[in-house]
Each structure stands twice: as structure tokens, then as C-alpha cells.
Amino acid sequence: MRLLQLGLCCLLFISQSATAKVWDSGTNIWTDAWEIKYQEWVTKNWKEDFFMRPSAANYYRIPHDCADAIYLMRAVFSYENKLPFKVHYLNKKNQYLENNMTKWDNLPEDQRFRAFSLFMNDRVGTRSFARDSFPVELAQIKAGDLYTEPGTHSYAITGITDTGVTAIMSSTTPASPKNMIQLYSFPFFIPHDTVAQTDGYRRFKWPRNIDKPAKSQPGYSDEQYTIAQKVGLDYVPFTDVIAKKLRRREEPLEEKTMRLMHSLCSFAKERVNYVNDGINYVKKFRAEGKRQCMTASEYDYYSTPSRDKRLFRFFKEVEKIAYEGGQLTEDQVNAQVLARTIFHPELPDGLLEQLDSFCGLAIYPGDDVKHINLRELWNAMLAEKVSSDPHAPFENRWGLTDNKFVGSCPTF
């Protein structure tokens, strides 16, 4: 009889483990109240080092790119609060990535979540958001929402400042364990897909609504596309509209200019990381003697054409606001004067030192370190000396030479 009982217990254990979910959400469902808790959690907990804290073993050093990090943000909250999670499997119909998956039955629950995360990250991307989220009214943008430009980049919204500016968090390609990047700025994109509405400011669908069209989702609005068209897809007027809808106080010109300057500096410093990663990757496989050129997917990861176009456009927006006020003098360097230092043909002595101090870019041509400032980078981009090709030498990547790069490797 005892042997029979032991056998039944073993069978029960095997049966339970054989149907083990990533996590069990029970009868819990997403509601408006849970969305508010999610918004509060994102504001408080979603920080740059979220995946780099040894104390958080479940999440420590999970590799991620921009889209992965946003999906993980939603998944982690769902996991910790035992809520359902369900998103589409990229490029596959009627297949989902969800907490009810039983692919990792043999693992403890905390390890199942990590395994699920790694599996999910390879099967979602910026193009996934079109099916897993929906566009929202600009006045209703909240922490926990996201911005996506399919095929290019995505940002998590982590808060709203008093002046109505979004706090944004983003990761970068290629997927790797790293800190994320936080800015107090609007994503440097404008919603433009007026037909399919795959881009823009968006909110995750609830799992029970995952296959319902965007227009039937509670909170759906196509307002942002209409407004973007009305301002001619011009970044500053469009983001001014958002700020007016979200702000609790006005943003003075000085404060706005300094915000844009800090954002420009951050975008430029991001480029340092992109370029160094590409240069080091090419050096590595060439040193191994395997090949001379990147594959198509590698080139997509390490080349920077879309990023460089965004950076150039950001320079142009800062140039516009630089001349809205202030006298060009080194006696009192306000935000307008500092911004104008990037673009003005002639400068009083001392202003370049101020610009260097504000945003010096430490770029690495090997074992040496070279510093350039925003003015030098702008002039190189304006002269079309800056190459986006990851095969290009360091000097061409930063426009430090007049010799145009002509590569022998294919571009994609």
C-alpha cells in the first residue's frame, strides 16, 4: 500500500512538473487599477542598471536591445505580480509568447522566467509592437507606454516632467548585458505611418485583447498622426504640442534649450559606443583571419545610417532654438549662447572651452584617446565627411579626414 502511495505521489509530481508554466497567473487579469500600479512601478523601478544588479539574480545580465528591454519591462512586472503576459511571436501567425508556456518544465520558477526571457528576446523586435500595442492620445501618455519606429528604434516612457517632457529609457543593438540609457527628452521621431499606424506613442494590449484590432482597444486614439501631419512632421512644433498637453508648468526658453543640448550630447555619446562596438567587432574577426567583411545581419547591427540621420536632424533642431535669444558673448554663457557655439562662424575666445567642458566626446582610435566637441562633429557631418559604414577606418567614422572612404565590402 505504501509503495502504491509513493508511486501515486511520484506520478502527481511528474504530472505537475510536466505542465509547469513560466509563472501561474491564476485568475488574475489586467485592469485599469493594475495599469496604474504598472505606471507607478515603472517610474520607481525601471532604472538604467535594472539588468546589471547582482542582487537581482533573476534578471542579472539578461542581454537586451531596445525592443527586448521594453518587452522585459512588461514581462517582469507581470511575473512579479502574477499577471498574465501574452505577446505575438514575430513573423508567425497564431503563435504567442506567454506565461502559460510549458517549454521549461524541468526548471525552477525563477530559472523558467530567465529562460523565457532569453527565448522571447530572440522572437520580438521593434516591428512586433504594431501587433502587441496600440496608439494613444498624446495627453494620456503615461509611464509604461512606449515609442517605436519599426525597424529602427524604440523607447520606454518612464515618467513625465513638470514641463510635460517625457523621461525615456532605451537600450541599443546588438543585444548584450548592459546599462540602459535614460534621457529627459522626447523620442527623436515623429509618428508618420498614417495608414497602418505601426509607429508612435503606444500602450501594451491586455492579453485578453491581444488579437483585437488597435481601434477596438480601450484608450485608442489616432490623434498623434493627425497632429504630426498638421505640423508638417516638424519635430519641435510636434513636441511642443505634447508638452502643452502634459505639462503642469511652462518650460522657459533657457530650460528648453538646455534640455535639448543635454539630449544632443547624450545622442552624440551614444554614437561613440556604436562606432567603437563596430570597429572592435571588425578588428576581432579580421584578426582571427576568418573574413574581411560583415554579414548582412552584422552590418544591420553595427552600421549607423539611420542613427546618423537622426543625430543630424537633432543638430538642426538645436540650431533653430540657439538663435531665439541671448547675445553671443563669453561674459555670461546662457543656454542659447552655448548652443550657438556649435554653429556660429566666429566665436569669442573661451567659448570653445565652455563647449568642451559641457560635452567633450572621448573617441578611441585604438589605444589612444582623442576628444572632439559638438562643433567639430557638426562641421564634419555638414561637410558629409562622417561615414556610417562599420568597415570604415576610425578617421572616416568621425570625419577626421578629407579622404572619402570607398569600401570593398558590400553594404546592405
Image (cartoon, rainbow, N blue to C red):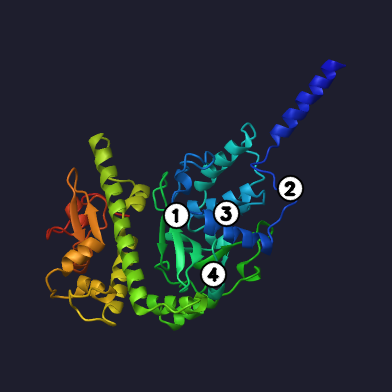
Q: In 3D space, how far apart are the residues under numbered discs 4 and 1 (Cα atoms)? A: 19 Å
Q: In 3D space, how far apart are the residues under numbered discs 3 and 4 (Cα atoms)? A: 16 Å
Q: Kindly identify which residue carries mark 4.
A: 141
Disc number placed over residue 392 in the picture, else none: none
Q: In 3D space, how far apart are the residues under numbered discs 2 and 3 (Cα atoms)? A: 18 Å
**Judging from the image, what secondary structure is the residue with disc 1 in?**
helix
User: Which residue type carries mark 1?
Assistant: Cys
Q: Residue at x 21, y 70 (%)?
A: 342
**Judging from the image, what secondary structure is the residue with disc 4 in?**
loop
**Judging from the image, what secondary structure is the residue with disc 2 in?**
loop
Residue 234 visible in image: no
Q: Residue at x 71, y 37 (%)?
A: 19
Q: Residue at x 31, y 68 (%)?
A: 261
Q: Residue at x 66, y 59 (%)?
A: 34
Q: Of marks 1 and 3, which one's residue comes earlier in the chain?
A: 1
Answer above or below: position of 346 versus 35.
below
Disc number placed over residue 66 in the picture, else none: 1
User: Which residue type carries mark 3?
Assistant: Arg
